Image: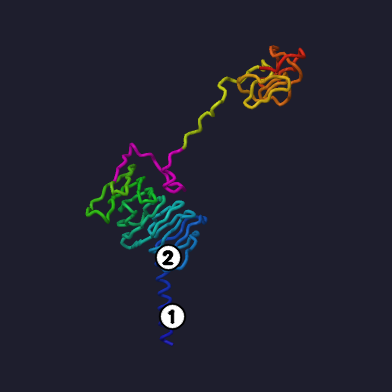
Amino acid sequence: MKFLLVLLTACVLSGLAEAEDHIGSVSEPFYQGAVGVLPESAGSEALNYAVRVYPKEVVDASAGRTTLSFNDGTTLQVGIGSKVKLDEFIFDPRSGTLSGALSFGAGVFRYASGHLAKHNELKLNTPVASMTIRGTRLVIWVDNDGKTRVDVIEGAISVIACPTKTVTSIGLAVKQGQSVAIGTDCRATMIGAGENTPRDPTTRPPEERSVASSAPPGTPSGTPSGPPDPGGATGGSQGPTGTPGPSGSPSPSGPPGPSGGDGGSTGGGTKPGNGLGDKNHTHDGPSGQGGSHGNNGKGQGAS
């Protein structure tokens, strides 16, 4: 009996320890398609609101996005098409110390430091950079090949390019309003506050934002340059696809107009010529729509 009691107590304590081992939870109010994958699990878990996340868990937002809140108050937005591994996140509320590491794969992320940690030794890693942070809000962009850009919205960071390939331990300081870009060649390029356009994380993968926006299409060739006929003086203006009336000949190119008139007009008219209108006759119809019928019984269609 005593053995069973001890075993039961051990199981309960083990369960509590496992339950308390979580490092944060999902704060996105509605499920957005992201999943979490633990190393020992055979599958993935939908990251619904309030679902807990654990060390070494991979947050995969290939088909969605999510927001995580960690135990110290830190928040991390994971954009569409993004992936991050929660290597380790150790927060001691008694001493106010935070340590650990997050490893960012391709994607776009917004990170905001929590307010409970007094000593923050958390590392933010990408394929080409490692960052330490100080009271920071920032946006991290990682391309598929690992190229990284970090925009510091608030606070400051210290960046070491390609830490696995360099012996230096002195990081490049990047302050509020500045950005830094680290290429696959491990070169870091600073962008000053005056050159830096404020950014906000989007729901697009980083490779999409590198594509230049297309210019508006130009004016199609062959478009008439003349203005539309203001007064219907020719019994209907020449339209782009008009058909000549039965008795009229096609008229030369003229200014554009929405519709032709009745007096043998050939430009965009919806009615055939009604006889042989006088092309020199002046009509009173509204612009590009209706002149009066031909009046001499035998002229050609309007030009």
Query: Where in the figure is residue 62, as x and y percent of width and height?
Result: 46, 55
Instruction: Determine crowd level at label 1: few under 14, some 14-19, many 20+ residues with C-alpha closer than 10 A.
Output: few
Please, what is the three-letter code of the amino acid marked with disc 2? Leu
Query: Where in the figure is residue 241, as x and y percent of width and height?
Result: 64, 27
Q: Earlier in the sequence, mark 1 or mark 2?
A: 1
Q: CA distance from mark 1 to mark 2?
A: 26 Å
Asked if residue 277 lies left or right of residue 59, the reply is right
Say what secondary structure mark 1 lies in: helix
Please, what is the three-letter code of the amino acid marked with disc 1? Leu
Asked if residue 6 lies left or right of residue 174, the reply is right
Q: Residue 8 shows which numbered tag?
A: 1
- Give the overall secondary structure of the magenta segment: loop
Q: Residue 38 shows which numbered tag?
A: 2
State yes or no: residue 33 in magenta: no
Q: Residue at x 31, y 61 (%)?
A: 95
Q: Give the quadrant of residue 296.
A: top right
State yes or no: residue 202 in magenta: yes
Asked if residue 157 lies left or right of residue 270, the reply is left
The residue lying furthest to the bottom in this view is: 1
Q: Is residue 102 above or below residue 211?
A: below
The magenta-colored residue range is: 188-213
Query: Where in the figure is residue 222, as x and y percent of width and height?
Result: 55, 26
Q: Give the quadrant of residue 84.
A: bottom left
Q: Quadrant of the N terminus?
A: bottom left
Q: Nearer the viewer, residue 162 or 145?
A: 145
Q: Quadrant of the C terminus?
A: top right
Count of residue discs: 2
Say whether marks 1 and 2 touch (CB < 8 Å): no
Q: Is residue 40 above or below residue 295?
A: below
Q: Nearer the viewer, residue 247 or 180?
A: 247
The answer to whether residue 148 of the structure is visible from this angle is yes
Q: Nearer the viewer, residue 219 or 66?
A: 219
